[in-house]
Image: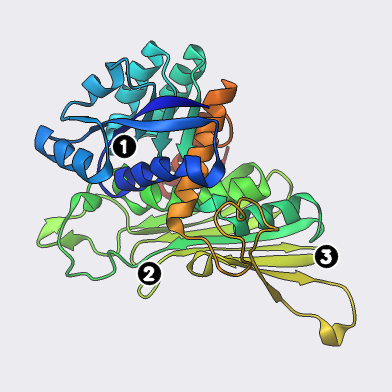
Amino acid sequence: MADIGLGIIGGGYMGKAHAVAYRAVGAVFETRLRPRLEMVAAASDASAERYAGAFGFSRSTGDWRRLVEDPRVEAIVIASPPETHLEITRMAADLGKPVFCEKPLGASLQDAQEMVKLAEDAGIVNMIGFNYIRTPASQFARQLICEGTIGEITWFRGEHTEDFYADPKAPLTWRATGDANGCMGDLAPHMINAALALMGPVTSVMAEIETVHETRGGVAVTNDDQGQMMCRFAGGAMGHLFFSRVSTGRKMGYIYEVTGTKGAIRFNQEDQNAVWLYKAEGPEAERGFRQILTGPAHPDYAPFCQGPGHGTGYQDQIIIEARDFLAAIEAGAARWPRFRDGLAVSQIVEAARQSHAARSWITL
């Protein structure tokens, strides 16, 4: 067992989630590498010092460059705004340090492409944060599809819908400016990642994107509120994806349905510990979707709880990510989802924007 000095850039919502995860991961998964919360970086020295005290870091700084170059920081978690991701990765790659980056991979497709090149040319361990696909339920769904339980896949429907910006009177915030902070940069990547994980590559898209509330507090909103796209997968299946931050009543609508020739699967993140499975077998009168509650028999559940149906939560997804990042560092090789997997998502988002502008199908 060995320790590793961890630095987290960003102390807000996701910074805290990662700090909590790295404090817990060694006990939950009995990892051979045990993270040491070495340093946290934030927008100012004062806020960084506050985060360090709250989360248990040894040191803090208002300059992320000091964190990256510090010799006691041996691995880096990026939980800062998308426009910072590229430059942090550039410095980390130069120093040969492993990097875990929250989605989206960068503020643009060009950023994502450069980040992949930097990481791969330097040979550093790299991962991107798509936490929702890591629930035991979604891992099980992926397993069922790969094993052919529901046959040849013919259709996929996915959505990521929330209502945190549904109120037209909600004040203008940072979320209302910049493509990376709009719905297509913020929510869409999670469901696109799910579609790729469950279905494989996307070959073409046809998309519409719109801003529902064009002003907030009398100031123009410069990014999108929602979008939808039809798509075709390399395996031949059709698909439809919808993303919205103005979906009234929906709190965590990460939802997908997969239809095959022998059955179907349904999942809703608002009930993240259940998978609904239909098998086209047995007497017709007895057929129907059945609810499967996750338990120790499902992937990555048992380390958290020995009781079936007791459930895992959001923070547990981040702990699973932490386990995977530490395992990748120990092995000295990147593992899914790598920066390149994040780039695949960015390419689809860019294709959707191009499709919307051209009002036509776009081939990837």
The residue type indicated by label 3 comes to Lys
The residue sitting at 51% across, 18% down in the picture is: 120
Mark with earlier residue (3, 2): 2
What is the distance, in whole Å, between disc 1 and disc 3 at their CAs? 42 Å
Label 1 vs label 2, nearer the camera: 1
In the displayed structure, does residue 199 sit left or right of residue 356? right
Residue at image position (15%, 30%) is: 62
Q: Is residue 15 above or below residue 338?
A: below
Q: Is label 2 in a helix, a strand or a loop? A: loop
* First in residue order: circle 1 vs circle 3: 1
- Residue 52 lies in quadrant: top left
Q: Nearer the viewer, residue 59 or 173?
A: 59
Q: Decide if residue 279 is in sight here.
A: yes
Measure how far apart labels 3 and 2 are at the Cα level: 32 Å
Residue 347 visible (yes or no): no
Q: Which mark is residue 327?
A: none
19 relative position to 330: left or right: left
Q: What residue would you read off at disc 2?
A: 247
Q: Marks 1/2: CA distance? A: 24 Å
Query: Is residue 235 or residue 198 the one in the foreground?
Result: 198
Residue 262 - label:
3
Name the residue type under label 2: Ser
Question: Quadrant where the C terminus lies?
Answer: top right
Marks 1 & 3, CB-CB < 8 Å contact:
no
SS under mark 1: helix
Q: Which mark is residue 82?
A: 1
Q: Is residue 194 above or below residue 36?
A: below
Of pointers 1 and 2, the one earlier in the residue sequence = 1
